[in-house]
Amino acid sequence: MRIATVAIILFTVPAAAGGYTKATPAEYQVAYGKARAYALAHQTIEWPPSCRAVIGAKAVKPLMEACGLVAGGTTHMRCRPAMPCHDILDRLAQYCIEWKGNVPCVAIEDGGEDRQDPRLRGRWQSP
């Protein structure tokens, strides 16, 4: 009974079907763009506000989902709602292996490419 329940849960989870988030690739890329624009414009702030506070809870949700998925179930790599945008972007850039241009965590089926080699991955600070 337990095995059947676990199997049903695994097969009905949207993230298991492909992609990084429940949001559309366009929604994710817009959220990433907002977070990146804010982080680049406010790099000198010593104690920046949370990304959720500056770009909105709805906009940051796809980023948090992607960060949670690439964390692989570990809690120390997972993004937290109180994190500033640059910390979320750093984690996505560090752990995502599929990129579309300079945007991490874009699945191959959504136009991304596999960048297993860390030297091939981009940086969110780069143009």
Image (cartoon, grey):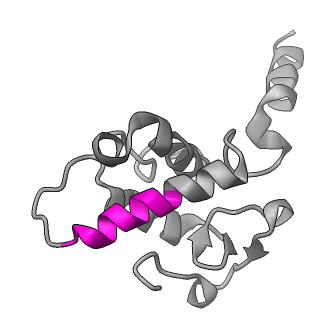
Task: Name the residue rendered at 69%, 63% in the picture.
Answer: 106
Name the quadrant of the N terminus: top right
The answer to whether residue 73 is left or right of residue 51 is right
Spot occupied by residue 85 in the image (x, y as percentages of width and height)? 34, 57
Q: Is residue 39 magenta?
A: yes
Query: Vertically, is 88 above or below 64?
Result: below
Residue 53 as seen in the image, left or right of residue 60: left
Res. 23 image quadrant: top right
Q: Which residues are magenta?
A: 32-43
Which residue is outermost to the left?
A: 46
Residue 124, x across and y down, in percent: 45, 75
Toward the top, the furthest residue is 1
Q: Is residue 24 magenta?
A: no
Query: How many tags in the picture?
Result: 0
Taking the spot 51% from the left edge, 63% from the top edge, the residue there is 92
- Please state which of residues 8 and 92 is positioned toward the viewer in this rendering: 92
Residue appearing at x 56%, y 45% in the figure: 62
Q: Is residue 77 left or right of residue 9?
A: left
Farthest bottom residue in view:
119
Residue 114 visible in rendering? yes
Task: Where is residue 55? Give x, y as percent.
Answer: 37, 47
Q: Is residue 119 left or right of residue 34?
A: right
| Residue 70 visible from this viewpoint | no
Q: Main secondary structure of the magenta part?
A: helix
Residue 125 vertical placement versus 95 (above, below) = below
- Tell me what residue is drawn at x 42 percent, y 48 percent: 79
Q: Position of residue 15 (x, y in %)?
A: 74, 41
Q: Is residue 92 above or below residue 71?
A: below
Query: Up-down: is 20 above or below 119?
Result: above
* Snapshot quadrant of residue 30: bottom right
